[in-house]
């Protein structure tokens, strides 16, 4: 060889599998961004104590959420906009069951059949969903991490809720400053680069050694 080639660093190809299109089925085992609408009076209790699953509903017991923020904004129904808040979530969906028609044999028994999450696709044949928007139900609320406030009309209250989320060790303060993933959902180590010594994590998009 006429010379020696040295390589330090990397550039990652983006995995966009955590961003779903409107009609794309969630992949088992993935972590997705979703939303949950609730009454503003319940917001602080949820941040401090966590979510309480519904005892029943279209898909039976569980926590009802959606990756469609416009659907989340509709909850709770018959409530003024200034009394609502929409939380931004990261959801470990686990094993997913698609429920896409009325009287589906597992409509309310999916969990008993080994599934962690039920998913109603958009424009399904379920007559009670008039909007045609997708819906998800997670059996175990520990699979859901509250990371922020996506929508709240009252700016003062929104800022207060965001501060409370950060004070609970959630939201932006729990994000890795290199890859911006939530360390509560995707825990990983930050170590010095083997060559230049800069801080690196295995999930950041790229790293170029600064050593001359």
Image (cartoon, rainbow, N blue to C red):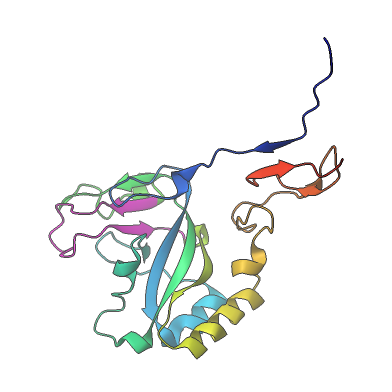
* Residue at far front of view: 2
Q: Quarter of the image containing the N terminus?
A: top right
* Position in image of residue 92 (x %, y %): 49, 52
The answer to whether residue 170 of the structure is visible from this angle is no
For residue 110: magenta? no
Which residue occupies 80% across, 22% down?
Answer: 5
Label the magenta part by its dominant secondary structure.
loop
* Residue at far top of view: 1
In-front residue for pair 166/109? 166
* Position in image of residue 89 (x %, y %): 48, 64
* Position in image of residue 113 (x %, y %): 35, 45
Which residue occupies 54% across, 76% down?
Answer: 47
When the figure is inspected, residue 141 is found, relative to residue 166, above or below; the finding is above
Side (left or right) of 120 relative to 159:
left
Which residue occupies 29% across, 68% down?
Answer: 71
The part of the image, by quadrant, that contains residue 166 is bottom right
When the figure is inspected, residue 40 is found, relative to residue 198, above or below; the finding is below
* Position in image of residue 50 (x %, y %): 52, 72
Report how many numbered discs are placed on residues in the image. 0
For residue 121: magenta? yes
Q: Which residues are magenta?
A: 117-140
Which residue occupies 69% across, 54% down?
Answer: 178
Side (left or right) of 16 relative to 200:
left
When the figure is inspected, residue 134 is found, relative to residue 100, above or below; the finding is below
The part of the image, by quadrant, that contains residue 56 is bottom left
The answer to whether residue 177 of the structure is visible from this angle is yes
Q: Quarter of the image containing the C terminus?
A: top right
């Amino acid at each position: 060889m006429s010379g020696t080639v040295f390589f330090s660093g990397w550039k990652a190809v983006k995995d966009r599998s955590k961003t779903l299109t409107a009609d794309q089925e969630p992949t088992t085992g993935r972590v997705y961004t979703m939303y949950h609408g609730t009454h503003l009076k319940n917001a602080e209790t949820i941040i401090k104590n966590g979510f309480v699953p519904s005892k029943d509903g279209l898909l039976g017991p569980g926590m009802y959420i959606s990756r469609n923020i416009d659907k989340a904004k509709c909850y709770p129904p018959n409530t003024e906009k200034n009394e609502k808040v929409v939380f931004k979530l990261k959801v470990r969906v686990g094993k997913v069951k698609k429920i896409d028609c009325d009287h589906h044999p597992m409509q309310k028994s999916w969990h008993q059949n080994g599934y962690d999450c039920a998913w109603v696709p958009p424009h399904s044949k379920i007559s009670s969903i008039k909007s045609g928007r997708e819906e998800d139900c997670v059996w175990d609320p520990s699979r859901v991490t509250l990371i922020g406030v996506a929508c709240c009309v009252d700016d003062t209250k929104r800022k207060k809720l965001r501060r409370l989320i950060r004070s609970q060790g959630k939201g932006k303060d729990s994000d890795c400053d290199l890859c911006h993933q939530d360390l509560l959902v995707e825990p990983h180590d930050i170590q010095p680069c083997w060559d230049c010594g800069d801080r690196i994590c295995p999930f950041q998009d790229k790293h170029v050694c600064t050593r001359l």
